[in-house]
Every structure is written in C-alpha cells, then in structure tokens.
Image (tube, rainbow, N blue to C red):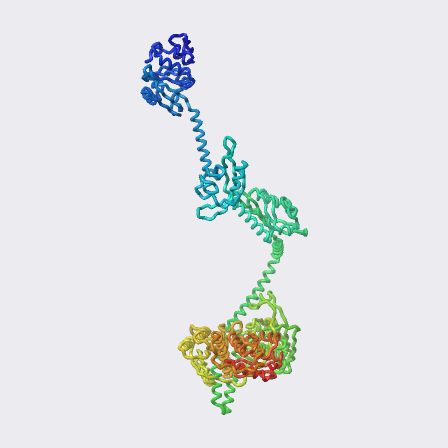
C-alpha cells in the first residue's frame, strides 16, 4: 500500500488508520521499525487509539511519542509543517524542529511529567520552507498515558495565529497612528460621552485652548463653566438629541486660559458630530475645530487697515486708486470721480482708459504691462480728461503691495496733477532763452544793492562813532550846564556876571542841540512818537517857515486828500522839515521856489530789495523840492554823512541831513534823494503808516519847581558830572549819596542805608549793568524809585527808538528845572505804587491814616473815570474810590479812557500825567473838547497841574490817601458844579 492511500479497515493491524486522510496512508507506509516505536504490530492499543483520534481531527495535532518525542501528526499539522513535511514524520521532535529544540525539550519534560502547557499567540521562528519565518501559534500540550496511566508521550494541538496576530498588530499600529494624529493634530479634538457630555478624550490642542485644565472625566458644564450663556451647552444638547451635526465658523467664545485670569475672547471654527454604537444609538459627540483667533484678528486688522487706507485716500488731495494683482483697477477715491465727472463703477476694469488722452494710451498701456510682469514700481506721465472736457497732465505712480510670502496682493496708485509744473517747465524753457539778458540785469541790480548795502554799513559805522562822541559830549555839557546853573545862584545881582553866565548857558544849549543831532544820526536818541497827520503838521509850520526862509522864497504846500496818519516824534519831524527847508534855501541862494508835499505811498518788494533796511508796505511820504543848484552823484553819495557839507566854512555844521537820515531810519522809515545839477533837488521822507487815531497836541505848564528831603543815591562814572549833579540835588534840598559805578552803588544799597531814589547813568564801566543795578535795588529796597540818565542810551532801556515799559529817563544835558520836575514825578509815582502794593498784599489790615471824613450823601454816587497805567496804583485807587462810595470806571491809557468817555455818563475824571502814548495832559484836553464842563483831577508827582481851557484841573500829588482823593474830587466838582443831581 502506498503512502498516499488510506489503509483499509480490513488490515488487521492498520485498521486504526482508517479515515486518517493523507497522513493515515503515510503512517501506514512508514518504516516504524527503524524508530524507537518499533513495528506497528507491536504498538500498544493506547497509541493506536490516540493516533486514530488525531488523524480524524481537523485541528493540527502532533503526537510526540516516547522519550524521543517521535512525531506522528495529522493532515492539519502537515499543512502547518510546510516544507518540513513529510520529512519530519517519524523523526524526533528535537531533530525535526532544531530551531526550537530548546522550547520542545521543555515541552517534553513537562508533558512526560504528567503536566500540561498552554500558549496563546506564542511567537516562534521556524524554518518551514528553508528560510526563517516568524510565526504565532496557540499551543496546548497534554500528556498521553499508557494502560497504567503513566505518561508515555505528549499530544500537541497547534493552531497557527500568525494572520490574526499580524492583523491585530496592524490594527494596533493604526490605533497608535490615529492616537498620534489625535495628539498631534493642529486642530483641537475632544470626545464627549453621554447626555452630560463627559470628556472622554481631549488632545493637547484642546487642552491648550482651555488653559490645560483637568477636564477628562468631567461633564463639560463642570469642566468649562464660563461657557454658560454662550450657547455651546445648548448646541451639544441639540446634536445629542437630533443626531444632526453642527458646523460653526469663526464663532466667538469667552474662555479662561489661566486659572486666575479673566476670560478672554477667542474665535473658533467648530464641528460637533454625533457618535453611534452598533445599534445606531447616539452615545457621544466628537468635537473638532480650529482656533482661528489670529486669523480673525488679522482679518479685522486688515479690514481696519483697509478702512483706514480708504479714509486716508479720501482725504488726500491727489487721485488714489487700487488694482488687482492682474492689473484690473477696482477702486477710486472721490477726487477721481469729482475730477472726471464719472459715476461710481464707470471706471472699474478698463473703464478708466477712456479718461486718458488718446495719444497717451499706447505708451501708458505698455508701461503698465511691463510693471505688472516685473512686479516693480509703475511711473509715467499722461494727460487725463477733466469733467469739462479739458486735459491736464498727471504724474501717475503705482506700487505693488505684497503678502508675507512676497506675492502681490494688490496695486496702490496715485495721480498727481503736474499741469503747473509742466507750465513752469515750458516757462523755464522760454526763460532760459533770455537768460543772458536777465543775468546782466540781475548783476546790475545786485551791484546796485551791494553799493547801497556798503553805504548803509558805512553810515551805521559812522553812526556808532558819532553816538559814542555824543555820549562823551553830553557828559561834558552836563558838567558845564550844572555848574553854570549853580553859579547863577551865587552871582545873583551881578548883572555883568549874569549876562556872561547866560551867554555860556546859550552855548551849552547849542552844544546840546549838536549832540542831539549826532544822536539822531546814530539812531541813539529816545523818541517820543505820537500819532499825527503830516499834512496838518506842515500847515501848522507854514507861517514859521515863511518867516525863517524869507520873502524871496516862494513856498507851496501840497497835501493829498485822504492822507494817512504816521507814528513819529513831532519834535524830530519839525527839526527834519526845518533842516530840509534851510538846506533848500541855501541851495537856491535865497531865491527860488520851495515845494512841500505830503501824500500816501506804497513801497513794493521790488523796490525794497534794492534798498537796504526798507520794508515793503504803506508809507506817508513828505517831500521837500527846491529849484536850486542840485547835487552831483559824488555829493549825493556822501550827503548824509555827519559833518559833510558843501557850504563855506562857518556856514553849517554838516549835521542837518545826518539828523534827518538817522531820525527817519530810527522811526522805521526811508529817505530818498533825487537831484539834477542845475535843476534842483527833492528829498523824500517815507514814514510808516499807522491805523491809530491822530493824537491832539497840547502845551503843558507846570509852574515853579520844587525840591524835597528824600535821600537820592547818584551812580555816575564821570567825576565832574557826578559832582555837578550832587550840587544841583543838594540845592533842591535832597540828601545825596554818591557812587562811581554800579558795583559801588550796589554796595551802598546793601549796607542798609535808607534810600528813596536811585539816580543812575545808563552807560557805566564795570561788570554790573545799570539795568541789573536797578533790578537788584528794587529787590533789596521795595518801593525805591529809579531814574535813568544818559546822553547815549544804547539798547539797554530803549528799543525801537522808545523807552521800555515803566522806565523813566532824563536825557543829558538837563537843567535844574527839568531835574527837579522829573524827580518829583518819579518819586510820586513810586510812592503811589508802594501804597497800592501795601493795600493789595494786606487787604484786611487797618489803614494807617485816619478814616475819611464823612462825605455828603449826594457826593457818594459820583461816576469816576480813573486813568492810570500802573496796575498796582490803579487797583489801590479803585479801592480808595469805592470806599468813598463812588462808582469807578477804569482805563489803563488815554485810548481806553476816550472810549469810556463816549460810552458812559461820567461826573469826574482822575488821570495820571505819565500815560503811555497820549499823555495825561493831552487826554485832558481831548476830554474837555468832548465835555467842556467835566471836572478833572491830575494825580501826579509834579508840583503843578497842566493848564486847561475853562475850569482848571485839580492837582492830587502822589502819594495820596482817601482824604486826599476825596478833597481833590470835591474841589474839582465844586469848580464845575458836577455831582449835584
């Protein structure tokens, strides 16, 4: 019988192999005698029975018989053995499977000892087909007992699970990959189970979103309580109930990112998807989404930037437009639509091309395409049609706006109107053609200006020199004048000596006039400007000029209608006009025609450029023309120099025109001379126009001079001047202290000696300036009066030709009378200021003077106009008047006072004399012209009130108190009968 045939059941010894399949035949044909089992006939019944059972089993089974473990197996095991079958049939197990001999030796040992073994998914490496192969098996080993129950073999059930294990391994790998994907996913994910939505899983992105809180195992309402009221709990409930997924984009959510922090707003794209079991029932929800906060904020920022850009573009005066990366224009600001007259949307895409001049379209289009292809700046010029059909040139630029990756997001462009620039370029081209001629003209103009500048610098240098000379000359004159005036007292009654002193004083006066002319040329004299009408001023001088010039000179005065006012010093104008007229008379040798004109003029910028120090604007011009011999250009170039004269020796000082020049320049004006030899000369004075109302001139009479007993500190560096001043002040009754310079004067002040006034020269040697001395004196002795004196003021207390505010100056040389009046005026003002300061700083303190006497009832309701420029004096005087029961209307200067006089019914005026601008005396004359019966009280430090037409004014000497004020008002109202309603 071959091995491939199943033995028949008729064989007496092989019947147990019947139905054993392929392996039954092989077992029947195998030479078992060569094994430890011996021939089949000798096999015990237990072996045969066991083999019969094994062969009929579909499960792979191998029987390991005896101590050698001889292998007998069924068809299932033969398939498991692979290439080892059938070679391992009848072999010893350790030899049949040498690669797992150690494992099988253990099996044999355990089985033959009567024990069992079981392995699940046991991994072994077998050489079933000549190569190592990793396999997994379920192995069950049991002992085979003989008739006596002794184990004589081991039966092994072998079920290969390699496919299952590999499938499970693959599934596990897939699970791990899914888990990694879950954990590493950029979006947040979570699995919630049950109706309470308990967190079952949550990836790191989800935990990061909620601040890494411990949420797994907790219901969402407990894990994330801040979601309450935001709709998320309700959406989860709805998905769980309906089974319908929920999708939300850019949903706002308030989340607490850190345990102790406030909730912050985030934005999420979100999906809630229901999870079902095998029966289709919903068991949970899978939540998945992305934190898009940065995207939302970036878009909002971009939208805000876009809105800001469009707002900016709308307020730009230029045309603004944008285009897509492909070059299609898609937005224009309102300026484009206003300029073109097009409607909204008409210019989009290629509609704007219709605005471009047809000749400019081809080059414009080529440049635009080139810029789009290269991604570089676009710049060109072309004409764009306006709504009226005309074309204007524009400079057109566009720049690409790129994303972070460098790709073009849009184009932004502007159109700038350059029509004027084009016109300018055309004009420039025309101008270039005539450049040479204009250069020649410009150079000639420049040479003229340079010559004028050199002349101005020359005159300035001479002015500085003459100013210094005048300063020393005035000091000398002050010594002479002071001593001559003192000497006149000593020789009283000696007629001969009195005549000589009078002659000497006349010479001093002429010297003072000469010094004044030098200062005028040097622009160093302090001016007292007033608003005046030059025409009326000239008419007022006409009679005097006729007497001065003589009958042989024909005088004609021409004044233009509507003549403007100017702001200048009347005395200096009078001197200037007189000098010009005398020079004209001399040039005409006593016979000829003199024409004086006054009119309005405007000097433009062209004229001003050619004349140094001339400011373009409106001027009042006063011209003096003669029919004399005229001047040569050489004489005209030097005519304003001091001491230059064409007259014979002894016939003139050469200072007349120098004074005219200096005064006019100091007043902000301009002088121009026109002259032709043999025909005559015209001198024009240009004085700046003012819009102010003309001041009314007045003549003041102050009566006899008086002195006092106050202590005066004299600071004067010139020893002779200082000695003369000390004698003059001593003669007036004052106590005098002396100092040779400002430092010495300050030492005396700091010594503590009581001093009422500082009388100081302006220009002195030393490190301490006179203005600083005055300031330090006021700091150390509050209430000290300060009076400056000088023959040369420089710029320390005079600016723009006028004294600084609250500065008192007595110019050298001066008379005893002028000195006496000025000292009383300054002392009176300072005493009144001191009283005002005391009343202001101690308003509740009792007054040192006795209370004012009872005032009649009818006198307590007077309406008083108080005119005072010193703030402290004005405040104190208002308090005094109001305590007396009067109603007060205040004014700081004459202009305000005149307005108040027109606006209010008034009973009496109380005015200071030393007002800025219009003086108190001039104001009083104006007030009387408006109201002839108005009572006037002069509050001053002088000893005499100015004369007034009609009823006289009443003098109220500073310092005054309530009694003095009441007495002065009563006296004034008594004279005029005012205040008696």
Farthest right residue? 388
Q: Nearer the viewer, residue 360 or 336?
A: 336
Residue 487 pos. (x, y %): 47, 87
> Residue 5 falls in which quadrant of the image?
top left
Q: On the rendered image, what quadrant is the N terminus found in?
A: top left
Q: On the rendered image, what quadrant is the C terminus found in?
A: bottom right
Residue 618 pos. (x, y %): 61, 69
| Visible residue check, residue 101 | no
Residue 774 pos. (x, y %): 46, 75
User: From what the image shows, is residue 59 above or below residue 833?
Assistant: above
Q: Nearer the viewer, residue 760 or 923?
A: 923
- Rendered residue at 68%/52% (across/down): 388
Q: Is residue 498 left or right of residue 900?
A: left
Q: Nearer the viewer, residue 966 or 297?
A: 966
| Visible residue check, residue 343 | yes
User: From what the image shows, is residue 887 above or below residue 289?
Assistant: below
Q: How many marks?
A: 0
Q: Is residue 161 left or right of residue 607?
A: left
- Rendered residue at 48%/45% (across/down): 226
Residue 361 pos. (x, y %): 64, 45
User: From what the image shows, is residue 179 above or below residue 164?
Assistant: below
């Amino acid at each position: 019988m071959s091995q491939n045939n199943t033995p028949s059941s008729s064989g007496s010894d092989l019947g147990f192999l019947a139905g054993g399949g392929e392996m039954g035949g092989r077992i029947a044909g195998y030479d078992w005698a060569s094994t430890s089992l011996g021939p089949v006939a000798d096999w015990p019944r237990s072996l045969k029975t066991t083999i019969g059972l094994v062969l009929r089993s579909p499960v792979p089974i191998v029987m390991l018989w005896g101590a050698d473990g001889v292998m007998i197996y069924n068809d299932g095991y033969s398939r498991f053995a692979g290439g080892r079958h059938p070679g391992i049939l009848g072999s010893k197990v350790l030899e049949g499977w040498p690669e797992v001999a150690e494992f099988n030796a253990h099996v044999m040992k355990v089985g033959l000892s009567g024990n069992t073994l079981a392995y699940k998914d046991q991994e072994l490496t077998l050489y079933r087909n000549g190569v190592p192969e990793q396999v997994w098996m379920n192995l069950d080993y049991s002992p085979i007992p003989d008739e006596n129950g002794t184990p004589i073999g081991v039966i092994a059930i072998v079920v290969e699970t390699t496919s299952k294990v590999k499938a499970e391994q693959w599934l596990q790998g897939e699970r791990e990959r899914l888990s990694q994907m879950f954990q590493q996913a950029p979006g947040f994910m979570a699995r919630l189970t049950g109706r309470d939505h308990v967190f079952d899983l949550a990836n790191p992105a989800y935990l990061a979103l909620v601040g890494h809180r411990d949420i797994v195992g907790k219901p969402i309402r407990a894990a994330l309580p801040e979601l309450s009221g935001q709709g998320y709990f309700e959406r989860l409930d709805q998905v769980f109930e309906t089974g319908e997924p929920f999708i939300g984009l850019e949903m706002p959510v308030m989340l607490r990112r850190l345990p102790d922090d406030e909730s912050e707003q985030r934005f999420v794209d979100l999906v809630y998807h229901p999870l079902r079991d095998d029966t289709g029932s919903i068991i949970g929800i899978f939540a998945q989404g992305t934190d898009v906060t940065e995207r939302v904020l970036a878009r909002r920022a971009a939208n805000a930037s876009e809105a800001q850009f469009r707002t900016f573009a709308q307020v730009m005066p230029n045309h603004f437009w944008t285009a897509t990366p492909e070059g299609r224009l898609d937005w224009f600001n309102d300026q484009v639509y206003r300029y073109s007259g097009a409607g909204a949307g008409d210019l989009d895409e290629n509609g704007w091309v219709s605005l471009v001049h047809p000749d400019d379209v081809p080059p414009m289009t080529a440049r635009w395409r080139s810029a789009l292809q290269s991604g570089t700046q676009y710049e060109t010029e072309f004409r764009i049609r306006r709504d009226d059909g005309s074309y204007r040139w524009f400079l057109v630029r566009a720049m690409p706006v790129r994303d972070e990756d460098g790709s073009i997001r849009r184009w932004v462009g502007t159109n700038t109107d350059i029509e004027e620039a084009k016109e300018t370029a055309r004009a420039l081209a025309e101008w270039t053609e005539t450049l040479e001629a204009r250069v020649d003209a410009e150079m000639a103009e420049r040479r003229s200006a340079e010559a004028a500048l050199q002349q101005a610098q020359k005159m300035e240098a001479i002015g500085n020199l003459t100013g210094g000379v005048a300063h020393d000359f005035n000091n000398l004159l002050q010594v002479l004048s002071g001593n001559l005036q003192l000497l006149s007292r000593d020789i009283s009654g000696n007629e001969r000596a009195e005549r000589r002193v009078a002659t000497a004083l006349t010479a001093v006066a002429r010297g003072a006039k000469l010094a004044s002319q030098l200062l005028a040329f040097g622009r160093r004299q302090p001016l007292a400007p007033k608003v005046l009408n030059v025409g009326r001023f000239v008419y007022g001088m006409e009679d005097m000029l006729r007497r001065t010039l003589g009958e042989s000179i024909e005088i004609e005065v021409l004044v233009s209608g509507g003549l403007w006012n100017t702001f200048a010093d009347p005395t200096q104008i009078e001197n200037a006009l007189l000098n010009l007229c005398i020079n004209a008379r001399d040039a005409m040798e006593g016979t000829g025609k003199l024409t004086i004109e006054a009119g309005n003029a405007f000097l433009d910028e062209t004229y001003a450029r050619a004349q140094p120090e001339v400011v373009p604007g409106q001027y009042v011009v006063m011209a003096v023309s003669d029919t004399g011999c005229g001047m040569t250009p050489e004489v005209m170039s030097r005519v304003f120099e001091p001491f230059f004269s064409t007259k014979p020796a002894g016939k003139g000082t050469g200072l007349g025109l120098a004074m005219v020049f200096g005064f006019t320049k100091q007043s902000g004006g301009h002088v121009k001379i026109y002259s032709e030899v043999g025909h005559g000369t015209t001198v024009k004075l240009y004085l700046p126009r003012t819009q102010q109302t003309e001041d009314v001139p007045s003549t003041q009479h102050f009566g006899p001079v008086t002195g006092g007993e106050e202590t005066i500190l004299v600071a004067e560096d010139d020893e002779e001047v200082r000695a003369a001043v000390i004698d003059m002040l001593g003669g007036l009754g004052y106590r005098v202290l002396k100092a040779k310079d400002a430092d010495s004067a300050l030492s005396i002040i700091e010594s503590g000696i009581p001093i009422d006034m500082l009388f100081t020269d302006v220009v002195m040697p030393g490190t301490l300036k006179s203005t600083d001395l005055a300031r330090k004196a006021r700091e150390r002795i509050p209430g000290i009066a300060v009076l400056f004196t000088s023959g040369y003021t420089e710029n320390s207390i005079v600016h723009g030709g006028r004294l600084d505010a609250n500065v008192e100056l007595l110019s050298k040389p001066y008379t005893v009378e002028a000195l006496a009046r000025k000292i009383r005026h300054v002392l009176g003002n300072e005493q009144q200021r001191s009283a005002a300061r005391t009343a202001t700083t101690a308003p509740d303190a009792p007054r040192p003077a006795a209370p004012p006497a009872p005032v009649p009832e009818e006198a307590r309701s007077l309406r008083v106009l108080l005119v005072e420029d010193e703030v402290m004096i004005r405040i104190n005087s208002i308090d005094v008047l109001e305590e007396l029961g009067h109603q007060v209307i205040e004014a700081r200067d004459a202009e305000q006072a005149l307005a108040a006089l027109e606006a209010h019914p008034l009973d009496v005026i109380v005015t200071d004399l030393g007002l800025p601008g219009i003086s108190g005396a001039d104001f009083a004359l104006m007030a009387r012209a408006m109201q002839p019966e108005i009572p006037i009280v002069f509050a001053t430090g002088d000893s005499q009130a100015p004369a007034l037409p009609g009823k006289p004014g009443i003098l109220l000497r500073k310092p005054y108190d309530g009694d003095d004020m009441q007495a002065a008002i009563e006296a004034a109202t008594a004279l005029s009968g005012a205040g008696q309603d």
